[in-house]
Amino acid sequence: MTTKPKAQKFRIRRSTGANSPNAETPSSTPETAAPAQAMDGTVDSPATVAAETNIDTIRQEGLTGRQLRMARRVAQKNGLAVTSDFDAVRQLREKGIDPFQRANVLELVTPNDGQTDAAAGQMRAATAKVPADQARVQLPQTVDRKQSLPSTQVSPATNAAEQRGREIRQIQLDIARRRRRNIIALFSRLAVFVLLPTIAAGYYFYNLATPMYGTKSEFIIQQAEATAGGGLNSLFSGTGLATQTDSTSVQSYLTSREAFLRLDGELGFTEHFSSDAIDAIQRLPEDASGEDAYGVFNDRVQIGYDPTEGILRMEVIAADPEKSQDFSEALIGYAEERVDRLTQRVREDQMTGSIQVFEQAETRRRDALAQLVQIQEELGRADPIADSTALQQRIVTLEVELDQERINLASLNDLRNPLASRVQAVETTIALLEGQIANLRGQLSAGDGGSIVSQNAQLREAEENYASALLNFEAARGQMDLAQIEANKQVRYLSVSVSPIAPDVPTYPKSFENTVLAFLIFSGIYLMISLTSSILREQVSA
């Protein structure tokens, strides 16, 4: 054995029991092949070694069994003589053919007998050209020999192109047929689940539904204007914010069971909607419960509140326009009574205390005045104080005269020979004056009804009591006036801006709008169910 350059690889060929070099089956690989029984000492050529190296590289790519089978079929289609699936991949790549390209895969259709014979002949010719030392064991080929007549086609390439065109047209026809079938199924489902219910709803709204009349009205709750004041009360007075709580309370009351029961008892709301003139869908059953009737009341009496303007808008729907107007007027009356009762307790609480204080002050004033009159009647004088003043003035006058007479007497006594008669007359006058002054002082200090001083004290006390009672009476009256003003500030008034007038044309049902709404609802339900089922089907098949 001679040595060769290092760039070349040497391999000793193993001989199998069948004496065929490099014999391998389609399912065996060089690694899984049975061990050789003997070596004949022959050396592979560099091309063979390179081919096996390429096969090892392809084997390491991790191709699947389906890809390998596809590569073998493409190699057979191109008339290549291969010894294994990996060899098919190698030879196709050497010829510049991608065995996994989509165009090449589409060509893997079942050829006719002429194509099969041509491919088999090319394979036999290629096998015959292989040298004996490179010959491989070929897998048995399945050839359909049912038609032994010669092919009428001109060439295998032309037959393959026509066959490929026919297959593409068949695929396109299948796709169009499948698409047409899917469209028909889609329109069928839309007709069943969307169109038919919409048509039924439209037929009901246009032909079967009982006409309903809606009476609209608007009213507002106003607060009494304050005569004076400031702060937040004056800031929000006259706006909707001042009566927002009252408006929401009235709105809640008009939609409550209390208002429903009162309206039903006075005007027969349940009896009206149980009439046979109303269609079966909108009519209340004869054995309907109170809850069912209350539900119809909430549907037929619609009340909305606009907080920006403070306006309450109400619409009452009934099968008869006159009934609709009667129901509206009755509810507005209920609202007025509720508004009056909202502030009645506050006003009563504010007025009760002030009225009691005023009544007590008035009673004390009357008692004080009666006591003053009684004292004046007991004394027998209209004004004892004036009488006491007059007595004091008289006493002062008499005392002045007494002093003058005493001066005269002293002058007479100073004379050397005074006249006895004159002195006696002056002394007599002085005695009379003194007696009169004593008498007047006795009248001032004591009398039949007591002294004038004590009488003056009683009268003064009675006058002071009366004056105090009078002041308290005036203060209580002022307080009561203020309480009356504050109570008037709490008063609420319900002012009707739009009176309820029954329409002469049915307001409901709005046939076109309701039909469109029914279509949108059924479409949304169908779309939701379709998306849900598609997602579930995709999750199950994943």
Image: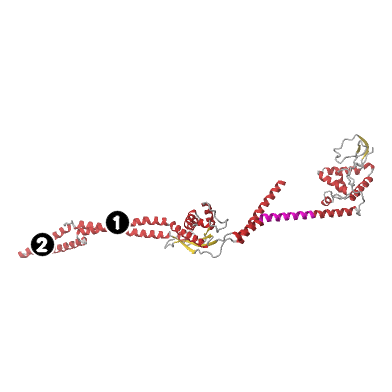
Examine the image and state in which quarter residue 340 appears: bottom left
Q: Residues within 10 Å of mark 2 (few under 14, many from 20)?
A: some
Across and down, in percent, residue 528 comes to 66, 52
- Is residue 51 shown to the viewer in this render? yes
Whether residue 179 is in magenta: the answer is yes
Q: Residue at x 89, y 50 (%)?
A: 115
Q: Which region of the structure is painted magenta?
A: 173-194
Disc 2 and disc 1: Cα gap in Å?
A: 50 Å
Marks 2, 1: nearer the viewer: 1
Name the residue type under label 1: Arg
Across and down, in percent, residue 84 comes to 87, 43
Q: Residue at x 73, y 55 (%)?
A: 184
Please say which color scheme the image uses. Answer: secondary structure
Across and down, in percent, residue 122 comes to 92, 48
Q: How many marks?
A: 2
Q: Residues within 10 Å of mark 1 (few under 14, many from 20)?
A: some
- Determine which residue is flagged by label 2: 432
Q: Main secondary structure of the magenta part?
A: helix
Picture disc at residue 172: none
Badge 2 marks a residue whose secondary structure is helix
Across and down, in percent, residue 525 comes to 64, 53
- Determine which residue is flagged by label 1: 364
Frontmost residue, 382 versus 253 = 253
Frontmost residue, 67 versus 209 = 209
Quadrant where the N terminus sits is top right
Residue positioned most to the front: 276
Mark 2 or mark 1, which has the lower sequence index?
Answer: 1
Q: Is residue 125 left or right of residue 365?
A: right
Whether residue 119 is in magenta: the answer is no
Answer yes or no: do the residues labelled 2 and 1 have beta carbons within 8 Å? no
Frontmost residue, 398 versus 516 = 516
